[in-house]
Amino acid sequence: MRRVPTLTLLLLLALVAATALGAVACGDEEEAGPEEGQSYSIGVTQIVSHPALDACVEGFKEALAEKGYEEGVNVTFDVQNAQGDMATATTIAQKFAGEGLDLVLSVATPTSQAMVKADSETPIVFSAVTDPIGAGLLSNGDAPEANVTGVSDMLPVEPHLELIKRVVPDAQTVGLLYNAGEANSVFLVDAEKAAAAEMGLATVEATASNSSEVKAAAESLVGRCDVISVLTDNTVVSGLESVVMVCRENGIPLIAGDTDSVKRGAAAAYAFDYFDHGKQAGYIAAEILAGKAIADLPIQFAENLVLSVNEASAAEMGLTLPEDLVAEATEKF
């Protein structure tokens, strides 16, 4: 059960190494950009609509624009959304595979898996994927093989749990709400359970296979836990308002795994900004479009954890956030 700290350390070391290599490369050669007169076609496949994933796509576009790849000028984006349906995600992937695109951005694990299965030629940059190797997207994150690289949104669960203990110091049991069919979520929940046990916290689980089941799953945790934890599960986050409602009605604090969820009503989060996460993916895409080999672009990990709080929503859950925590917060809603 010691896997989590070791894995987190390895990820951090990989990030440091990748950053160092990038710095060397930038110092040795002039940064390339789009070819004059060249137009580019980019496909975007997204598993579901919710603010974090939407922000990821917008960040991706902004980063490309910074590098000279501007929508409506020399880039055309075909943005497709599976709306949570895997059959649709597969159809989108097959469509993109047959179109001769210059690059595909795949947002979240299910769409990335579908894209990698359908296309072994078009450069694929994934984002919002927690465990790309475990999900079968590639086998070597340091030197990606074939046509796939990207950015993982691996969330360190220890800071998330420390936030829970700080916000709800008397909490003994954490309710974990997620989709058991989503590889990202299972990976993170397993890590969260292991870390919680080491911190002396018990856990209980409730699962939802689609957004229509989220409210019932949240209600099933009432009376069984002291606080509810929602990490980066796309199914639950897409139906977050129903979780917020259940928490407010029953006086249960909700701690999230992304900043947009705090804006939508969670009490607090120590997490990534998904707009910045999308920008990381966009910078990788720009290098690929400029001719850099994917094998020379190691996978990266989301950066810049920020503390976000929502005092008004926390109060509706019967929770008063500590003054020092509020003072530390980067974002307040």
Image (cartoon, rainbow, N blue to C red):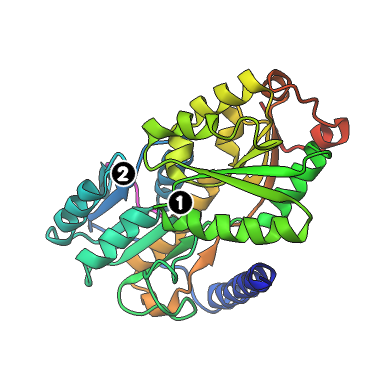
- Report which residue position mark 2 lands on: 71
Q: Residue farthest to the left?
A: 98
Q: Distance between the residues labelled 1 and 2?
A: 11 Å
| Of 65 and 253, the residue lying toward us | 253
Examine the rendering and report whether any part of residue 156 can be seen.
no
Residue 299 position (above or below residue 328): below
In the image, residue 68 lies in the stretch drawn in magenta: yes
Residue 119 position (above or below residue 230): below
Q: Which residue is pictured at 34% across the width and 55% down the height? A: 110
Horizontal and vertical percent for residue 260?
55, 35
- Report which residue position mark 1 lands on: 63
Q: Please, what secondary structure does the residue beneath circle 2 have?
A: loop
In the image, residue 313 lies in the stretch drawn in magenta: no
Q: Which residue is pictured at 37% across the width and 31% down the height? A: 212
Q: Mark 1 or mark 2: name the one nearer the start of the chain.
A: 1
Q: State the extent of the magenta-drawn residues as a range.
A: 67-72
